[in-house]
Amino acid sequence: MTETKIALVTGANKGIGFAIAEQLAAQGVTVLLGARDATRREDAVAKLGASGASVSGIALDVTDPATIAAAAAEVESRFGRLDILVNNAGITGDLSQEAGAGGLAEVRRVFDVNVFGVMAVTDAMLPLLRRSPAGRIVNVSSSVGSLADMTAPDGGYLADMPAMLGYPVSKTALNAVTAQYAKHLRKNGILVNAVCPGYTATDLNNFAGTRTAAEGAAIAVRLATVGADGPTAGFFADEGPVAW
C-alpha cells in the first residue's frame, strides 16, 4: 500500500498558494496549509475541508524563526517526514521604487520574504524531506526574474516594466537559490525546481492578471508530484523551460 504523501505549502491561505493546496489535496495528498494569519488560515482549511480534502493549518511566518522551528517540529511530531515543500509565500513590495531611487529598506523587506524566508523554511524542513522516498521542493518564482528577459536588447516583454531592485531581483536570487539546493540535494534524490505561474490574477497585482489562480498553480503541482525521472535544477512555466 502506497503511503499518502505529505505536503507543506507556504502562503497557502489565498491566491496561488490556496490553489496549489487545493490541487494537491485533490490528488490525495495530505496538505499542511502554512499561513501566518490564524483567521485566514483556518478559513482556508475549512473551505478545503468541506470538499473532503485532507488538509490542516499550520502557523508559519517565513520571516519568523520561531514559527518556522515550531512548524518543523509539528510536522516531525505528526508525520515524521515531509514529501513535498512548496515555497509559495512571497511579496511584491513597493513596485513604484525604481533602481537608483534608494529604498534599500524596502528591498531588504522583499528579500526577507522571497529569498531568506525560502532558505529558512527549506533548511528547517530538510531533515524531514530527506526521510521521504521521493522528496520534492518547488519554489514559486517569476519570469520577471529571468536575466535573459531582463537583458533582451529590445526590452522584450519586460520593456514596459520599470527597472526595480526589489521584486524582480529577489526572484533572480530565488532562482539561484533553487539551483544551489538542487545541486546540494541531488545525491539524496530530492528534486528542486523553480516555477513561474504566469501573470495570475491575485491580490499581488490587484487581480489584474490574465490567468486564474488554478491555472497559475498547475505548474507548481506538476513539479511537486513529478516522478523520479523528472527534472531538477530547472525553471519552468506551463509552456516549458524558462530562460534563467
Image (spheres, helix red, strand yellow):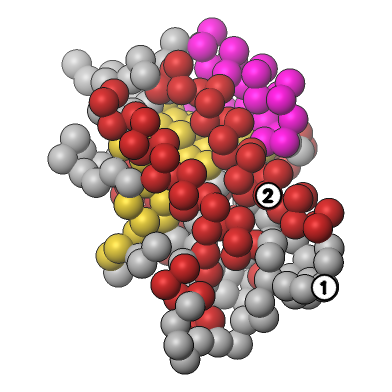
User: In this view of the protein, can residue 205 be seen by the observer?
Assistant: yes
Left or right: 221 with respect to 161?
left
Q: Which residue is mark 1?
A: 101
Whole-percent x and y of residue 76?
51, 11
Whole-percent x and y of residue 161?
62, 81
Q: Classify 94 as above or below 17.
A: below
Whether the residues at callouts 1 and 2 have beta carbons within 8 Å, the answer is no
Whole-percent x and y of residue 143?
47, 67
State which region is magenta. Answer: 48-77
Identity, as a three-letter code, of the amino acid under mark 2:
Phe
Examine the structure image and report whether residue 152 is included in the region drawn in magenta.
no
Identity, as a three-letter code, of the amino acid under mark 1:
Ala
- Separation of residues labelled 1 and 2 (CA atoms): 17 Å
| Residue at horizontal 16 percent and vertical 40 percent from the top | 229
Examine the structure image and report whether residue 67 is included in the region drawn in magenta.
yes
In front of the other: 188 or 237: 188
